[in-house]
Amino acid sequence: MGEAPHVRNPLPGAGGGQIGGIHVVSLAPGADLTGFRAAARRLIAANVPPEQVVWQTEAPSLFGTDTAPADGPPLRLPRAVTELIPMVVPHRDPERYGLLYALIWRVLASERALMEVASDPLVHRLHRMRKAIGRDLHKMHAFLRFRRVPGEGRERFAAWFEPDHHILEAAAPFFVDRFRALTWSILTPEGSAHWNGALAFGPPGRREDVPEGDGFEAGWRDYYESTFNPARLNLDAMRAEMPRKYWRNMPETAAIPALVRAASARAQAMIEKEPTMPAKRDPIRAVARMSQDEPDSLEALNAIIARSEPLVPGATQAVLGEGPVGARIAFVGEQPGDQEDQQGRPFVGPAGQLLSRALEEAGIDRREAYLTNAVKHFKFTLRGKRRIHEKPTAGEVSHYRWWLDKELDFIAPKLVVALGATAVLALTGKQIPITRARGPAEFGRPFEGFITVHPSYLLRLPDEAAKTVAYQAFVDDLRRAHALAA
Amino acid sequence: MRKATRRIDPAAGVFIFRSMDEKLARKLRILADAAKYDASCASSGAPKRKAGADGLGSTTGAGICHAYTPDGRCVSLLKILLTNYCLFDCAYCVNRRSSNVARARFSVEEVVTLTVEFYKRNYIEGLFLSSGIIRSPDYTMEMLTRVAKKLRRDHGFRGYIHLKSIPEASPWLIEEAGLYADRLSINLELPTEASLNRLAPEKDGAAIEGAMGQIGERIVQAKEERRRFSPAGQSTQVIVGADATTDEAMIRKSALLYGTYGLKRVYYSAFSPIPDASSALPPQAPPLRREHRLYQADWLIRYYEFSPDDVAGAADDGMLALDIDPKLAWALKNRHRFPVDVNRADREMLLRVPGLGARAVDAIIKARRHGRLRLDDVARLTSGLKRARPFLIAEDFRPTTLTDRLDLRMKLAEPAEQLSLF
């Protein structure tokens, strides 16, 4: 910011005279981080100790604008120091540059870890300055109020704020991040910031440049008044966090005197008032009805599931379970695949067709069984135009678990067959390897359990011989399950 | 009479509200008043976010208080109820169905408008939405979630959203709420099942803790899977002084809640006189300082390595002293562990010194690596030296007589009148 800084000897050519060693550095008004950095580099390069530097701020013209000497090499400083500097430079204390330079000097001389010694008087003072800047920034982000600028077209907002320190530039990015889609200006006595898709800084503004009011200020004051609890008056706490100097630029603070005056009377009235009898009749029927709000049938539950949105966006629709209420055997798969997602029915894709064939061979009538999935929406990654199935995470399985539980409550089967690891996870809450747990299982539910592989596993086996063996084992499992469910 | 003015922005194709009408303002007054007994106002803990090109809002992680009311409380979020009509009849609540307070109900659209327009003017960090139970817990929960969803979807809103979850609602509704909210909370309100039965007949302690468990589990899973589910965690509130629960029992309950459900915060709310109070409540409100002491004890457990047993040890008959803070109370009861040498003691013991905060302790540990600390050095690291002095040893200081003085408690106690009610 500002013009190039310059370091000069007030008595050029005087060499080693009595005051000849003094360097005067003149920096731009406000927070001249660039100027300070350049000056510090140069002074360190020239090995100038802090006590031989005079830092001129707020008066750049005093020494003219003669050409700045060449830059020094970058300084290698601990991170704690480089992070501190931009947080102290905006301080209005004229000694800030001198203190920072003294810190840099000591750190480079021998005290690399000086920043760790928070009890050192210099470090302590700089920490306090940093804290003051942090607080000033925080209060500006908190207490600045925008007002809508009347006019047609895009909405424009403007605010007037009076920070304690030179923080406008440091404070602006917060408002950009937050109000990127709006057009706004922040005016301060030292300068102004403007955002209209790009951030620009300009000359100081005046309070009168900001509209006198805003259509929402009365409503905001209403809110402020209503959220105050008169039984807990604590003015010290309020003033400590929101000092009076900020009040004049905050519309809601106009309500404070009246709130405070009335507080104790209001609180006393609440305490003294006798409990009243309910004036309205007791909504007995409504109260009784509210507990019957749970879905009371499979259709009601399915309506809720059908309405739901996929946890991972992309699926066309929720795929509901299929089969009669009261089915003796229920099958739980993983999640709908590409075909299922398009048709809205479970087990209609390649794995579903394989399951149908195996069920038939095992003597199970698919129409009399209940088939459903642990997860109700298809999750995939796009590869070209193909939608490649993606395994649901444990969190996604838990997310859908409630519906599965409820569904099975309505169906009330004698036996539930978990097809694959995801179904087992959904039914037991545990990750259990299928190969070891295959067969009858205890799910800790009101129905018997059975674990086998998912039919898509059979499709994925590369070797035809292995496929045949595995398929036969799958049919055998289904036959056993069928017998258990009988 | 104020009238709303609004028109369609030709560029954006959306309604732009220029002001609020009197009807909306009246609802706001009623529904803000009805929501203020919830102590939580935090807007912290959300992952850092910035507004998208067309969106609105950001979160910084730390939370911002945009104003303070004369009760010293922070105004960070627009804290309102969707409605204060309620079918429940909780004795401590201003909105119980048998109360005669004025009632109102916002539409989803109205809450969205207020949030967006207040946010644009930099009045708030976001929304904290709760509601009385209308029609049914499920219906109410769906309405709350609809507001959050509309803000996120239709307005690209990236500010903070805290939703009150209704534990009696179906679990899948909580699953959905967590997708849009930064924080979910369920208020336990009363720390024991017996008190719940007596004072909040429609509530069910098991349902409350079941829902907390569900939320807690989902938050952990989502973090592992890098998904978004209530990223700023969950919190709860308990009312202090509405039943006979002791401070010790309260703190033990909190420790259990932190441990079991991974709660971010337990808020303690001294039950406050409310308009149209129920006769089931004790006639006298508890001193606000009791609430303050509970917060301090809670803090000791979360950040100072105190156990619930330590807190119990600082209390008398289960109640914390009102005139001194619990850390000092513990120190006075454990004088044999003091004074502590700032140049040698380990972190755990330094944290036990009254007047030394966690930050001061960390600064001491760093600084003493580079030289022995004198009392002046310690004074620069903490603002609590006056309280710490009798309990510590520095290079040039030893509190020879102070620790044993019987009147130490009196010397260090706060004047009693400061935080009382009137």
Image (cartoon, coloured by chain):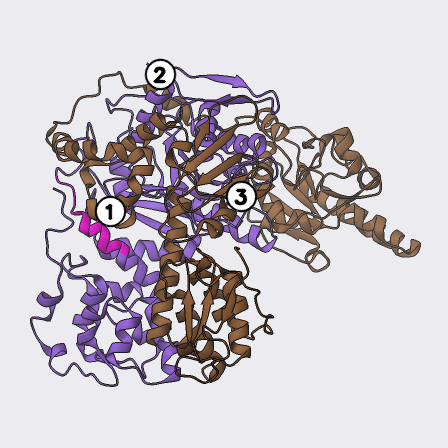
Quadrant into which the N terminus of chain B falls: top left
Which secondary structure, mark 3? helix
* 3D distance between C-alphas at marks 1 and 3: 29 Å
Q: Chain of mark 1?
A: A
Quadrant into which the C terminus of chain B falls: top left
Would residue B349 appear left or right of B114 to someone viewing this image? Answer: left
Residue interval drawn in magenta: B284-295
Would residue A464 appear left or right of A257 to someone viewing this image? Answer: right
Q: Colour of chain B?
A: purple
- Mark 3 surroundings within 10 Å by alpha-carbon count, few (fewer than 14), some (14 through 19), many (20 or more): many
Residue A283 position, x and y percent, is: 32, 19
Q: Chain of mark 3?
A: A
User: Which numbered disc, 3 or 2, marks the residue closer to the eye?
Assistant: 3
Would residue A37 appear left or right of B342 to someone viewing this image? Answer: right
Q: Chain of mark 2?
A: B
Q: Are marks 3 and 2 in contact (CB under 8 Å)?
A: no
- Residue under circle 1? A239
- Residue under circle 2? B2
- Mark 2 surroundings within 10 Å by alpha-carbon count, few (fewer than 14), some (14 through 19), many (20 or more): few
Q: Label 2 sits on what residue type?
A: Arg
Q: Label 1 sits on what residue type?
A: Arg
Q: Residue at x 45, y 85 (%)?
A: A16
Residue A240 position, x and y percent, is: 25, 50
Which secondary structure, mark 2? loop
In-front residue for pair B243/A5: A5
Q: Colour of chain A?
A: brown
